[in-house]
Image: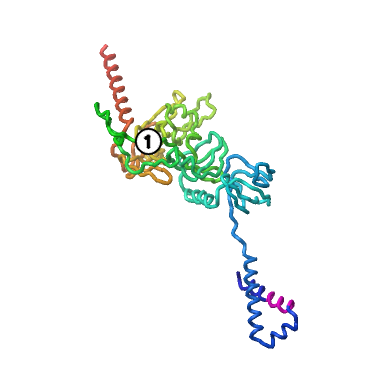
Amino acid sequence: MNFVLRSAILKANIWLVSTLLPISLLSSFRRSGAVFSAFLAAFCLAFFVFGCNHLHQRPREMVYVSTVRPIYLHDRVAPVSTRVCQVVNGQPLQVLERRRRFLKVETDKQQIGWIEELATIDEQTYNGFVKLATEVKNTPVAARGILIDDLAMHLSPGRKTPRFYLIPGNSKVELLARATAPRKQGEPVETGRIAPPSATLKPGAVNAPEAAKPAVPPEMDDWWLARDAQGHVGWLLASRLDVDVPDDVAQYAESQRIVGAWVLKKVNDPDPDLTNHEIPEYLMALSTPTNGLPYDFDQVRVFTWSLKHHRYETAFRLRPIQGYLPVRVFTQETARGAAPAFSFEIANGASVAIDPTTGITRPVAPRTISYQMVDTRVERIGPDLAPIVAKQGSGKKHLAKRTNERQRTLVKKRRSRRR
């Protein structure tokens, strides 16, 4: 309380004393100056303390509606009650009173009613969403997505984590980072080095102890850290959104999960049957349709436009790798002029670091791999030109299968030439 307010209260106290007390009583007090001074000081102190307490207001406690669908405030907590007004997702409410499982709140239009506490989030959780949006303000966009239906943003990856903002279906969002989390709350998330698969038990080891059996890994969900058109930031369940990719190239996904697609350049096709003669050529990142992978994508493809056949063709494919977002697309100066280029990070071995809070996976010792495209030819550039080691697991089987197919094709060609 400032000095001016204190002076005003003190003057008011003196005026009240001089007005309300009888003159005879004041004159008697004045005969004994010490008694009068003590009484006046005590009276002023009591009124000053009372005035301060009366003027002091309790800090406002705010909550925010977190339900997916609109709900109603009720006039009382009872099986039979009257609806006061409707509140929607994200609406702020001031708390007036607390009861078990219920809150008495007031809207910004001075409408007062009761709401279940589970239908709201407190101010601390709300500030967590604000802090998250501030932290990723300058994070580059890794991809873009479209929501399949209405979806709520979560404060951290997980189906049981606090959720707040409701994003309508068919909304477009910016995807900033990918993470994984156990489907069931409380299951541990593996961190550090990826352990190799357990060795197969030898024949005859039927009576092996229970402790020797490999642990069943928990079911995992993929999540995207997303930002909507209003600037709201939160985690969205990846299975409830699609990466925004044109249908012209999405049809070549070959049952793989599209992680992102980026335009490298545009070519002009004068074919009169085409509606748009400026055709974009794409870089696409894909992964196997499996949740909980310790990397973001395992292959990249470049689709160029054939002016002869008027269709997309695969000009470059790299797989299987352990790739991580974001993918950077830029322009590289060459002897023939500016050419589109792109780069991304891959893991250097099996050592990865998993954030225990968000579940974001990053390689411990990443390598930056760069390519440039001149006409329809994609070639390696940059300081790191060392061989790319294929990722473990199904990748080696895929390479072996692909090598065998090439060998069989060469054998058939040789036999046809001999004939």
Could you say where residue 400 lies in the image, as x and y percent from the top left? 29, 26
Q: Which quadrant of the structure image shows residue 218?
A: top left
Is 323 on the left-hand or right-hand side of 95?
left
Q: In terms of secondary structure, what is the magenta stretch mainly? A: helix
Could you say where residue 125 lies in the image, as x and y percent from the top left? 52, 50
Would you say residue 389 is visible in this rendering? no
Q: Is residue 15 magenta?
A: yes
| Secondary-structure class at tag 1 | loop
Q: In this rendering, is residue 53 above or below 214?
A: below
Name the one closer to the observer, 277 or 54: 54
Name the one closer to the observer, 240 or 216: 216
Q: Residue at x 66, y 45 (%)?
A: 74
Residue labelled with disc 1: 217
Within-10-Å neighbours for mark 1: few <14, some 14–19, many 20+: few
Name the one closer to the observer, 300 or 279: 300
Please identify the quadrant where the C terminus is shown: top left
Please identify the quadrant where the N terminus is shown: bottom right
- The three-letter amino acid code for the residue at tag 1 is Pro
Q: Is residue 410 magenta?
A: no
Could you say where residue 215 lies in the image, as x and y percent from the top left? 34, 36
Residue range in magenta is 11-20
Residue ranking furthest to the top: 419
Q: Which quadrant of the structure image shows residue 384?
A: top left
Name the one closer to the observer, 4 or 278: 4
Could you say where residue 225 lies in the image, as x and y percent from the top left? 47, 42
